[in-house]
Image (cartoon, helix red, strand yellow):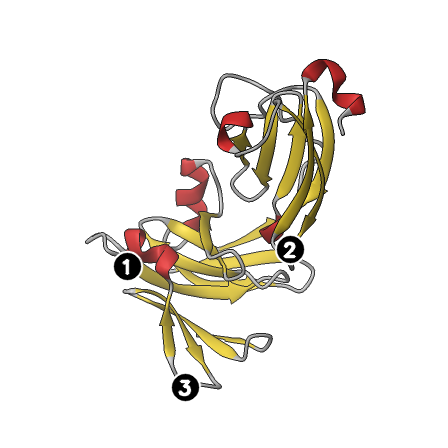
Amino acid sequence: MKLDRKRNSIWINTPYGLFEFSLSSKQFRTIDALTEITKSKEYDRHTGNDIDKDGKIWFATNPLGILIYDPETNEVKKLFSDSKLQKEIGERVHHLYIHRGGIVWTSYYLPKGIYQLVLYSPSAKSYSSGSNSNSLSHSTVTTIVPGVHGKMWIGTLDGLNIFDPLTEKFEVLREKDLKGVKGNAFAPLFVDTTRQTAWISVGSRLNYHNMS
């Protein structure tokens, strides 16, 4: 179990999935985002779990290794995209401790000692346009503005791209997707999260600097 002082709750890693127990309502909450994962007959838990500085819940599972749950976005992801590394680090985790400085320590039921994981982000990463449906729709970018849930609204000469840094996927919207819009050159100006409204300039590729 792990006490979450910010949310006034306790996170419990169980063989049936991750549970949150509210100290205010004295009620348990199941995590919907884990439904597909936990219904597998192979699913089980190991005992390690902790909370990082961003409030995300790290918990050890079998056979998937260490998973990270974000309560703000209700999304779950693996610690590593590399399947071999995910198995090596996440197999039979006994304890999982995240230091305030961001360093993660893991110990195991297996006789393989302790791992120290130093989390970092690369200094630069390129996202280019391509035929893949999850890629940027055009290499010429007009504007970038913040949206909800940490997503970014990116205008290009061929569509509006909504980028999720967590999944690293682009959702592309064009003229056919938005009623009343004429043109595929988009320049998002502002996303008002309170009123659920976005201000966007739209026009032709040849005249996008002067779009009204």
Residue 19 vertical position relative to residue 109 in the rendered view, above or below:
below
The answer to which of marks 3 and 2 sits earlier in the sequence is 3
Q: Are marks 3 and 2 in contact (CB under 8 Å)?
A: no
Instruction: Identify which residue is drawn at 62% across, 20% down.
Output: 138
- For label 1, the SS is strand
The answer to which of marks 1 and 2 sits earlier in the sequence is 1
Q: Nearer the viewer, mark 1 or mark 2?
A: 2
> Residues under labels 1 and 2: Cα distance?
39 Å
Amino acid at the residue labelled 1: Asp
- For label 3, the SS is loop
- Residue lying farthest right? 210
Residue 122's mark? none
Instruction: Identify which residue is drawn at 66% across, 41% down.
Output: 121
In the shown orientation, is residue 200 left or right of residue 15? right
Dot 1 corresponds to which residue? 44
| Residue 5 percent coordinates (x, y) | 58, 78
Q: In which quadrant will I find the N terminus?
A: bottom left
| Residue 178 percent coordinates (x, y) | 53, 34
Dot 2 corresponds to which residue? 193
Dot 3 corresponds to which residue? 26
Quarter assignment of residue 188: top right
The 10 Å Cα crowd at callout 2, few under 14, some 14 to 19, many 20 or more, is few
Q: Nearer the viewer, mark 3 or mark 2?
A: 2
**Is residue 120 something one can see in this rendering?**
no
| Residue 58 percent coordinates (x, y) | 49, 59
Quarter assignment of residue 11: bottom left
Residue 54 vertical position relative to residue 20 in the rendered view, above or below:
above
